[in-house]
Image: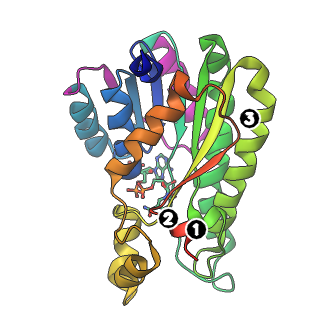
Amino acid sequence: MTSSRFDLRGKVAIVTGGNGGIGLGMARGLADAGADIAVVGRNEAKSKAAVEDLRQRGVRAIAVATDVTDKAAVEAMVARVAKEFGRIDVLVNNAGMSIRKPPHELELEEWNKVIDTNLTSAFVCSKAAYPALKASGRGKVINIGSMMSIFGASFAPAYAASKGGIVQFTRACANAWAADNIQVNAILPGWIDTDLTRGARQQVTGLHERVLARTPAGRWGHIDDFAGIAVFLASPGSDFVTGTAIPVDGGFSVMG
Ligand code: NDP
């Protein structure tokens, strides 16, 4: 039966940044497919609300307050999830942020903050979760890049560098862990309506309309657009898919 390929009952997923935006969209998809979820983020009120939302879907869900730039905290988070649920099958490295400045105005501290949050955290979380993902026998890692993994961005140099790095890190892990039957893939979102882009939309005149004109689908993305791809990349249906970077962008990256 085809649907069993996408059945995640009995699986446990960690979603960093799962308390809102794209992370919550993916966490909802994974929960609807039956996975138990650990929501990772710093804002405890938002994480509590996300956990309630996920529990309504009939799965177990916990919030683990963690700053993903803190290696010791990440290791403690992974240990807690493994203890609480007894296994870890899926890691979604989604937590991210941006600082909107051209390269000549960006401070080193700002550069480091973006790289630490978006790229180094994916390494730290993946390394911490690797033993459990290997023990799962069918581990899955989903890294969140961006269309800025591909295109340049004059206003977000550290962000673009971190997201380009995510794609190469994905390929490295896919190669390294194929023998452990861990598949590692990246999703490259287009312009999505979340807190991350809301500020830019308010500050940058005409951005909303430019995105509509530049996106063949003719709309901004919604967090629900990430549920299906997350289930696919977390499920046995994608067991022969690894090292890829899949745009979820309404055609932004193929616009002629
Ligand atoms: P949001 O701002 O809505 O969500 C960001 C999430 O990351 C929050 O849950 C936040 O939780 C978490 N987070 C940020 N910093 C940390 C940290 N140090 N430790 C733990 N958690 C952290 O953004 P989006 O949903 O839009 O973004 C999600 C991912 O998608 C990011 O990687 C982003 O770069 C990527 N993306 C988004 C696009 C868009 O158009 N929206 C386009 C391309 C890529 P908390 O604050 O509680 O810590």
Kind of element beneath mark 3: helix
Q: Is residue 39 left or right of residue 239?
A: left
Task: Say if residue 192 shows up in the picture.
Answer: yes
Name the residue furthest left: 56
Magenta span has 155? no
Comparing labels 2 and 3, the label whose residue is closer to the camera: 2
Name the quarter where the C terminus is drawn: bottom right
Marking on residue 174:
3
- Magenta stretch, residue numbers: 56-83
Q: Where is residue 154 in the image (x, y as percent from the top left)?
A: 62, 82
The answer to which of 57 and 106 lies nearer the viewer is 57
Q: How far apart in space, not on screen, are marks 1 and 2 (Cα)?
A: 5 Å
Amino acid tagged 1 = Val
- Residue at the disc numbered 1: 254
Comparing labels 3 and 1, the label whose residue is closer to the camera: 1
Name the quarter where the N terminus is drawn: top left
The answer to which of 162 and 191 lies nearer the viewer is 191
Marking on residue 251:
2
Q: Is residue 36 left or right of residue 240?
A: left
Query: Which residue appears at 49% of the width and 65% of the height?
Result: 251
